[in-house]
């Protein structure tokens, strides 16, 4: 009986040891923090393109000539051509490509080089200068493309890849982490002007020519379009910025469906909440977005939202800065109904309101 029990015990022990052996690599991988980015890189480089634009610019240089009688004449302005480059991301197998507006704005001709070295002429489908996004198309089929990830679910500290064509070096991949979300570029560049003030900040190296390229997560999902770097030299100095994919997805969809971008409007003027205001409002902690003014007759006014209210949530998603709120609203269409949680005089209230169209578009 004892021998049989010992045999059973050893068999059980052997099984446990085998389980531990097969589990060790997985645990070591988690503890080391290493992430395999090879598959994501392979998938992305084939879906990111090199964009070359031919720009036509009138020159202030005039040419002069003499007629047979010695009279001098001035010819008209001579056209001047120059080339600019950037990157783009293939979104569909039939050739829709998203890039930055500043990459293609003013282009006389646009050429796209695929990762298989094919060179194709592209046309502009639509541009949205306010978000610095543009949609172009090439006439071909069966292209590799990237699927949208959910930028709202991206986490600070998450590994990302930036893929583009810096300095005309095609198919360049750099890695980093998400350093911040809902970043307002006015904080680092007062001259920056955009309809969105909510960018994904990363330390993945982005340089000239990366504009319009992909920011992807470890699964190879598109979570942003690289748009800017903060640098006095024009080259990477430690951090760069991408337009969140949820905004990109909405802008692209609008351009395809309507030919322009439709923007939703709550009818409020908002500011970041600071400690002094939070104390004045007797809030237990500093959270939410302060409503400085409610526009008369607007969506918020119609449902009873007031100035000095604090917006805590939009559709059960917390908002703790003006940038976060703007990013959230950018994803909605005019006419959409949203739930807004408000702090007012020590109590929380829920409001349902219908977003209106921004007349400034």
Image (cartoon, rainbow, N blue to C red):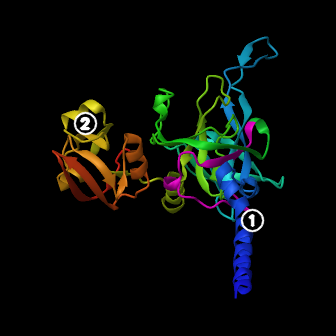
Count neighbours of disc 2 (C-alpha within 10 A) and say few if under 14, some if 14 to 19, many if 20 or more: some
Viewer-proximal residue, 3 or 196?
3
Residue 156 rendering spot, x and y as whole percentages: 53, 46
Q: Is residue 81 above or below residue 299?
A: above
In the structure shown, which secondary structural element does the residue marked by tag 2 occupy?
A: helix
Residue holding disc 1: 21
Residue 102 figure quarter: top right
Task: Say if mark 2 contacts mark 1, CB within 8 Å.
Answer: no
Q: Which residues are magenta?
A: 138-166
Left or right of 49 in this view: 294: left
Residue 36 figure quarter: bottom right
Residue 149 within the segment the image draws in magenta:
yes
In the structure shown, which secondary structural element does the residue marked by tag 1 occupy?
A: helix
Q: Earlier in the sequence, mark 2 or mark 1?
A: 1
Identify the residue at image location x=19%, y=38%: 281
Q: Which mark is residue 278?
A: 2
């Amino acid at each position: 009986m004892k021998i049989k029990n010992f045999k059973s015990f050893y068999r059980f022990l052997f099984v446990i040891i085998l389980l531990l052996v097969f589990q060790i690599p997985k645990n070591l991988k988690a503890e080391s923090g290493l992430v395999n980015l090879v598959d994501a890189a392979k998938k992305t480089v084939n879906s990111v393109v090199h964009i070359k634009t031919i720009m036509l610019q009138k020159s202030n240089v005039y040419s002069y000539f003499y007629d047979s009688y010695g009279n001098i004449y001035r010819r008209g302005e001579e056209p001047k051509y120059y080339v600019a480059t950037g990157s783009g991301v293939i979104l569909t197998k039939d050739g829709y490509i998203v890039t930055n507006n500043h990459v293609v704005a003013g282009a006389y001709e646009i050429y796209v080089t695929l990762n298989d070295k094919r060179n194709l002429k592209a046309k502009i489908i639509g541009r949205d200068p306010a978000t610095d996004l543009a949609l172009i198309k090439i006439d071909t089929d069966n292209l590799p493309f990237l699927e949208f990830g959910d930028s709202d679910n991206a986490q600070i500290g998450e590994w990302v890849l930036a893929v583009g064509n810096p300095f005309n070096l095609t198919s360049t991949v750099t890695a980093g982490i998400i350093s911040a979300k809902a970043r307002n570029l006015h904080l680092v560049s007062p001259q920056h002007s955009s309809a969105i003030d909510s960018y994904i900040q990363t330390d993945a190296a982005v340089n000239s020519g990366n504009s319009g390229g992909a920011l992807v997560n470890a699964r190879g999902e598109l979570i942003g379009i690289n748009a800017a770097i903060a640098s006095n030299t024009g080259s990477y100095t430690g951090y760069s910025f991408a337009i969140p994919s949820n905004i990109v997805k909405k802008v692209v969809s609008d351009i395809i469906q309507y030919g322009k971008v439709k923007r939703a409007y709550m009818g409020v003027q908002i500011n970041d909440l600071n400690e002094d205001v939070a104390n004045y409002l007797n809030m237990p902690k500093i959270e939410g977005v302060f409503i400085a003014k409610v526009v008369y007759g607007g969506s918020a006014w119609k449902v009873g939202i007031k100035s000095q209210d604090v917006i805590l949530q939009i559709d059960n998603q917390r908002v703790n800065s003006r940038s976060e709120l703007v990013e959230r609203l950018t994803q909605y269409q005019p006419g959409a109904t949203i739930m807004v949680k408000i702090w007012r005089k020590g109590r929380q209230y829920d409001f349902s309101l219908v977003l209106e169209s921004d007349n400034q578009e």
